[in-house]
Structure formats: structure tokens, C-alpha cells
Image: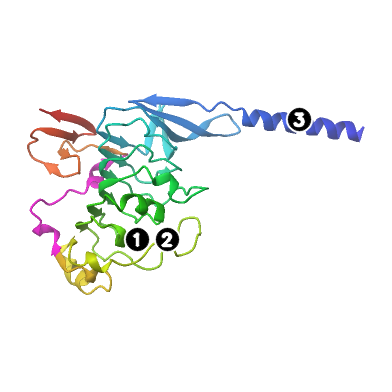
Amino acid sequence: MKKVLWLIVCLMTMVASANAHNVHYPTYTEDGITYVANYRDKQGNFSDWDVLKVDKPYDKTIIIPNKIVIDGKEETLNRIKGGAFSTCISLDSLIISDGLYVEEEGFKGCKELEYLYYSSNSCRWSTKNKYSYYLDLSCKTLETSVGVAEDAFWKSVEKTLEKLIIKEDSKFILTRIDGCKKLKTIICHAINPPKTGPVSSPYGYGSGCGHEKFASYQWSIITLYVPRESLEDYYFHNVWGEIDNIYAIDEMVETPTFINSTIANGVIMDDVWYSLDGTKVDEPTKGVYIKNGKKYVVK
């Protein structure tokens, strides 16, 4: 009798396990972006939504929010799945709201970005080759708050990166800057010089994830802009002070607008015109601009 009961329990466990693996996770599509749930609780409710696919082949500017409303309920987004941007052939500017993970090959298709806003420090490492899932990523202007620790990220952008914009907080950790041979401008809004100490990846791979320094050839070719009240702190910093040309941000001909200060839940909503690189524009001329989270083409 005990053997029969044990057999029944085993069969019930196997059926439950099979059903769990065969759960159909729902998808939701809005404005060309398809989301998929990745968790179901005991009551059968789905949550923890991911960006599955971005079907906007002709959009030059794409904004990925961190919250969406599905069936009247606000849901939080967690990650961007691999290959989500693979068909975005016209993509120039990509804004990924804070807090989203990017999975292996999540940036696939982002080969010629003029501008990238990305501040998460929780990127996914590849299981095979730590450089593989960022090989399709490149950008000329990167705006961030946290120095993405993985070599893979910086290894991808180092051949194209020309301008680095660092948010006003000081969580940015200097990594891999020494390999960015085209980098000419750094605009750092941090009052205190960002950290340059040992870096470890989010998954505990030790402190060999980046070089906390500038290469000697960069000392004279990079121009660093910082808050005026912090000029002295940067001048005498043991790493940031290596840069020969350090000026106050208010001395720039065009003071850049930090784009994330105008983002609410991933959408720019302040009735102001912005260029694709996040600069505030009084009167838009010919080109592509963003206003209240929407893209406009001015001819």
C-alpha cells in the first residue's frame, strides 16, 4: 500500500512539474514593443514583465520605459531579452530607463548608435564568452550614472565612443576608459569626483574587470567638463587630475541637458524640445526631435 501511495505521489509531482514547465506566459504589445511575463504566482497571476521584441524598424529614437500598464494595472519591467532590437535597422538613439537588466545579446542590432542612455549596473554576463553579447553594440555618445563594470560593455563601445556624459550622482566607476581611443569629451555632473577604485562585476568575478586610470595618450586629447564648484577637487584628484584640459560645465558653448532629469517612468514629459543627444532646444530646426516622449521630424 505504501508503495502504491508513493507511486501516486511521484506521478502527481511529475504532472505538476510538467504543467509548470508548460505554462503559457502571456505577451502584451503596445506602440511596437512586445512584453512577456516571466513569473506566475500560486493564484495564477502573472508579473515581472520583460521586453521581448521591439518592432520599430524605421524609428530613429526608441525609449524603453521601466513601467507599463496592462489591464489597468501598473507592471514593473525587469529586463530586455536577447535580440530585442535585432530588427531596429534605423535606430540612432536608444534610451533605456534606469533599473532594467540587459540579457545576453540584448543589444544585438544596436550597431550604429549616435546616442545611448543606459545606467543599470546589472548587465547579464554571457555564459560562453564574456565579450559575445555586446559585440553588436556601438555608440558615439554614452550617458550613464553607473560605470558598467563589465569589460564586455566597454570592449564593445571603445572603438566608437566620442563623448561620455556622467550623471550628477557619484556612483559612476571609471572602467575601461583607457581603451576608448576616440573619446574626446567627458561631461561629468558629479559634485564629487567619481570613484576610481577596484571594480568587481555584479556576479563576483573579482576585481579584474577594468583599469582605473586614463591612458597617457588621453591626458591631452580629452576635455573634461565638471561643476564649477568642484574644479579644484578634479584638478588635484590622482586619476581625474591626469587630464590636462579641465573646465567648468558652464563654460561650454552649449550646456548639455541631462536627459534623465526629464524622464518620468521612461518617458520625457516636460513640454520641451530635445535633440537626439538630450540637448534642450528652444526652436527646433530641420531634423529629428523629442517632445513629451514622442519623436517629431521637422522638415
Marks 2/3: CA–CA distance? 47 Å
| Quarter-of-image position of residue 197 | bottom left
For the residue carrying disc 2, how many other residues have a C-alpha within 10 Å: few (<14), some (14-19), or many (20+)?
some
In which quadrant is the N terminus drawn? top right
Marks 1/3: CA–CA distance? 52 Å
Name which residue type carries label 2: Cys
Q: Nearer the viewer, mark 1 or mark 3?
A: 1
Q: Secondary structure at mark 3?
A: helix
Question: Which of 152 and 285 lies nearest the eye of the viewer?
Answer: 152
Name which residue type carries label 1: Thr
Q: Which residues are magenta?
A: 247-265
Question: Which of 153 and 280 lies nearest the eye of the viewer?
Answer: 153
Query: In the image, 268: left or right of 96?
Result: left
Q: Secondary structure at mark 1?
A: loop
**Residue at x 40%, y 52% (from the top left corner):** 152
| Quarter-of-image position of residue 231 | bottom left
Tag of residue 12: 3
Is residue 291 shown in magenta?
no
Q: Which residue is the extreme one toward the right?
A: 1
**Residues under numbered marks 1 and 3 in contact, where contact means CB atoms less than 8 Å apart:** no
Q: Is residue 102 visible?
A: yes
Q: Which residue is the site of mark 1? A: 175
Question: Which of 9 and 137 lies nearest the eye of the viewer?
Answer: 137
In which quadrant is the C terminus drawn? top left
Tag of residue 209: 2
**Residues under numbered marks 2 and 1 in contact, where contact means CB atoms less than 8 Å apart:** yes
Query: In the image, 78: left or right of 59?
Result: right
Sequence-first disc among 1 and 3: 3
Marks 2/1: CA–CA distance? 8 Å
**Residue at x 41%, y 40% (from the top left corner):** 106
**Residue at x 23%, y 71% (from the top left corner):** 242
